[in-house]
């Protein structure tokens, strides 16, 4: 494929914007088409692991995001009673993986990414679809409300329900329900001290973590049929499910308002796609490999995709070769973790909790080692646009 001079990105989320910035830094003219009226990402917070932060280094953003890390100290995994099943140390994790785990609001990351694009690069209220994926001899074409755009490269970052994926691979079965729903909330919680934690119950989990700006990010998940909603409001549903769990969960629920709570069913792509590209169109993030959030890697893998795609922008088969095996393996692992932490049987959860507690005492570094191959990812080798950019480009 010839050099990418004109790129169109469908979707203004984390993966799409990261790809747009990376391609812009390589000299491409980039247009981002976002169907929403504003760049207001769905969801509350995102956890960026060292693998994604190394990717952001390529576009000059890694250190800015690392500076937003909230020191979490000792934390870990708990039972609903409050008993610690395993303990983790943020300093030990940072030393092992060569960087911190940064938890920040998705809107903060989106804002940092958008600020590194030209002011006219992002078009909101611009629903888009692939008209023609193109081939080595002709450009791809994208339909918009204002007419068609041609591009040397189209980045399809349009999420788990990706229309671009369906257009490229109409015979693929698409995403499946992961078996559970999630709730998320970001609120101030003054005067409440707690250790960062995730808590596993029977078919339910809860997590509470501090953000750098003083707010608290809490999330929950429960095994329920797809499409269910609370008969009153989602805060009331959380009170029914988690109101008698350990501190600070009751304090979070007391401080939250019904409008603060987001609820979404979880879906993932169980059958990997045959490729992450077709013609001149490349799929990024959830459009390519939606996965359960149980490893905290959905957004991280989207960043990896974007940086790798920019590196292989003129060789999309190389992009697929670099990304499909890795993302398929991480998706399988995330599904496996979901079976473990969302287990519903009484006997099974008792065995699970005892095994975790025993392993934590006998081999405390085991949990960190299990994450080595994920957090240890390195971006493709040079040349990088970031090595050639002049001062003042963000």
Image (cartoon, rainbow, N blue to C red):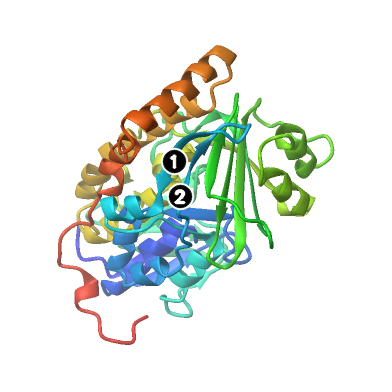
Residue under the image location 42 percent in, 22 percent down: 355
Query: Does 225 appear above or below 108?
Result: above
Q: Please provide percent x and percent y for residue 77.
A: 49, 37
Label 1 sits on residue:
87
Q: Could you tell me which quadrant the C terminus lies in?
A: bottom left
Residue under the image location 53 percent in, 29 percent down: 178
Q: Could you tell me which quadrant the N terminus lies in?
A: bottom left
Query: Does 302 appear above or below 117?
Result: above
Q: What element carries label 1?
A: strand
Furthest-front residue in view?
A: 361
* Crowd rating for badge 1 (residues with CA inside 10 Å; few <14, some 14–19, many 20+): some
Q: Please provide percent x and percent y for residue 210.
A: 56, 57
Tell me where residue 250 sits by quadrant.
top right
Residue under the image location 27 percent in, 75 percent down: 27
Residue 74 numbered mark, or none: 2
Tell me where residue 290 sits by quadrant.
top left
Residue under the image location 33 percent in, 40 percent down: 327
Residue 66 in view in this figure: yes
Q: Please provide percent x and percent y for residue 251.
A: 72, 49
Query: Does 385 appear above or below 105?
Result: below
Residue 230 numbered mark, or none: none
- Cβ atoms under marks 1 and 2 closer than 8 Å: yes
């Amino acid at each position: 494929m010839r050099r990418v001079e004109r790129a169109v990105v469908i979707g203004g989320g984390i993966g799409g914007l990261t790809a747009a910035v990376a391609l812009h830094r390589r000299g491409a003219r980039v247009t981002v088409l976002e169907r929403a009226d504003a760049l207001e990402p769905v969801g509350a917070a995102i956890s960026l692991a060292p693998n994604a932060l190394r990717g952001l280094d390529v576009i000059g953003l890694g250190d800015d995001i690392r500076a937003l890390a909230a020191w979490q100290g000792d934390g870990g995994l708990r039972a609903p009673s409050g008993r610690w099943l395993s303990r983790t140390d943020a300093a030990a994790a940072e030393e092992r993986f060569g960087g911190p785990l940064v938890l920040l609001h998705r809107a903060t990351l989106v804002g940092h990414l958008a600020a590194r694009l030209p002011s006219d690069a992002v078009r909101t209220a611009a629903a888009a679809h692939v008209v023609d994926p193109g081939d080595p001899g002709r450009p791809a074409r994208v339909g918009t409300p204002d007419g068609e755009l041609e591009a040397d490269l189209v980045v399809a970052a349009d999420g788990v329900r990706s229309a671009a994926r369906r257009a490229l691979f109409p015979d693929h079965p698409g995403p499946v329900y992961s078996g559970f729903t999630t709730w998320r909330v970001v609120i101030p919680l003054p005067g409440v001290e707690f250790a960062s934690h995730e808590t596993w119950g029977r078919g339910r989990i809860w997590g509470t973590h501090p953000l750098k700006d003083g707010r608290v990010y809490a999330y929950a998940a429960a095994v329920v049929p797809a499409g269910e909603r609370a008969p009153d409001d989602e805060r009331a549903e959380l009170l029914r499910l988690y109101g008698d769990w350990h501190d600070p969960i009751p304090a979070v629920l007391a401080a939250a308002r019904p409008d603060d709570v987001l609820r979404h069913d979880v879906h993932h792509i169980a059958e990997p796609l045959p490729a992450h590209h077709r013609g001149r169109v490349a799929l990024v993030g959830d459009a390519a490999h939606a996965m359960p959030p149980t490893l905290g890697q959905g957004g991280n893998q989207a960043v990896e995709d974007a940086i790798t795609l920019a590196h292989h922008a003129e060789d999309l088969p190389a992009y697929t070769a670099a990304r499909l095996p890795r993302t398929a393996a991480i998706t399988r692992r995330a599904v496996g973790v979901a079976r473990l932490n969302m287990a519903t049987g009484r006997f099974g959860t008792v065995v699970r909790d005892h095994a975790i507690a025993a392993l934590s005492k006998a081999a405390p570094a085991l949990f960190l080692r299990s994450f080595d191959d994920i957090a240890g990812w390195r971006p493709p080798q040079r040349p990088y646009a970031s090595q050639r950019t002049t001062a003042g480009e963000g």
